[in-house]
Image: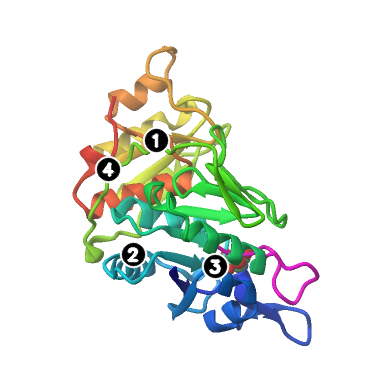
Amino acid sequence: MSIVVVSTGGTIASTADGGGDATVSLSGEDLVSAVPELESVADVEVREFSNVPSQFLTLEHCYDLLEVVREYDADPSVDGVVVTQGTNTMEESSYFVDLCYDGDTPVVFTGAMRNPSLPSPDGPMNLLASARVATDDRAGEMGVLVAFGERIHTARDVSKFHTMSTDTFRSPEFGPLGTVDEDRVVWRRWPENPDPTLDPDRDALRRDVETVTVTMDMTDTQLRAARESAGLVLGTMGAGHVPERIIDGLRAVREADVPVFATHRGSEGRLLRDRYGYPGSEHLLQELDCYYSDLNLQKTRVKAIVALAADALGEAFERP
Ligand code: ASP
């Protein structure tokens, strides 16, 4: 078997300086050579994509990463791709690639919470586990994956939950697809992926899709600013509700012809369609022709940006 490790930076590639502050310093070659056990899993080629903390990654980086993945998918000598990256934006970049990739070569994102200068760094084990997943013969049917802390998640469902724990990645509501037990990949679920594959134009990727989380007695300042944006992702309360005092602000966004993508500020569940009748209920979202999303705020933004750049809003989102 043969895999390519595409390294982008992050904690997995960070080491501490004299003062103890970690910065990104290790190359993909360094990461791979620190895990000799990889030799028993696959021949490993390394592609140095970038060496940055993941909060430095941009939409254009995500697109270029997609192109790299597509390139290896077209190469029959490559059986799998592992992307190493910082955890902070892994749920966004992996989902970006997932939305746009329709190949069957497995693609697995991983990283670390403890950098290699700390006791018990988790990067080497995560890299090894990801290589096992990337060479598993069923992985290519699962969409883009995130393998972290022995668990295997879909890029669509996974989110980073804990600021420091190595057990930070969770797939709320439906759970991970499987695990890596020692050297065995164990699948327990099959992903039902309702997303169509989208083909965005790189030059049409718009950063100015804004996100607003709805909070108790908030002002509508952010909503008014969003009238100038390419889209607004709204993390509503409960199952699609907003306070009465921001209704006019929300109307103004729609009157400016800005698409609104409604999700909720919780971690599980979907938006209601027809249960409450007070002002600011789910009926307002429908009256304003908002798109409905069942993803979290940051993933909804990725999907909205990709769908706008693919001119495929109607295909990507439901508008009940
Ligand atoms: N700051 C890091 C990053 O996202 C955190 C991590 O890798 O876990 O690049």
Q: Is residue 125 left or right of residue 87?
A: right
Can you see residue 225? no
Residue 119 magenta-drawn? yes
Disc 3 Cβ-to-ligand 1 distance below 8 Å: no
In this rendering, the label closer to the viewer, 1 or 2: 1
Quickly name the residue at label 1. Answer: 192
Query: Type of residue at label 3?
Result: Val
How far across and down, in percent of the image, does residue 147 sit?
55, 55
Classify 10 Å Cα crowding around label 2: few (below 14), some (14-19), many (20 and above).
some
What's the CA distance linking mark 1 and mark 3? Answer: 29 Å
Q: Secondary structure at mark 3?
A: loop
In this rendering, the label closer to the viewer, 4 or 3: 3
| Residue 113 higher or lower than 233, as above or below | below
How far across and down, in percent of the image, does residue 21 sit?
73, 78
How far across and down, in percent of the image, does residue 83 sit?
48, 66
Q: Which mark is residue 41?
A: 3
Q: Nearer the viewer, residue 253 or 204?
A: 204
Quickly name the residue at label 2. Answer: 66
Q: Going 37% across and 64% down the picture, which residue do you hit?
A: 59
First-in-chain label (3 vs 2): 3
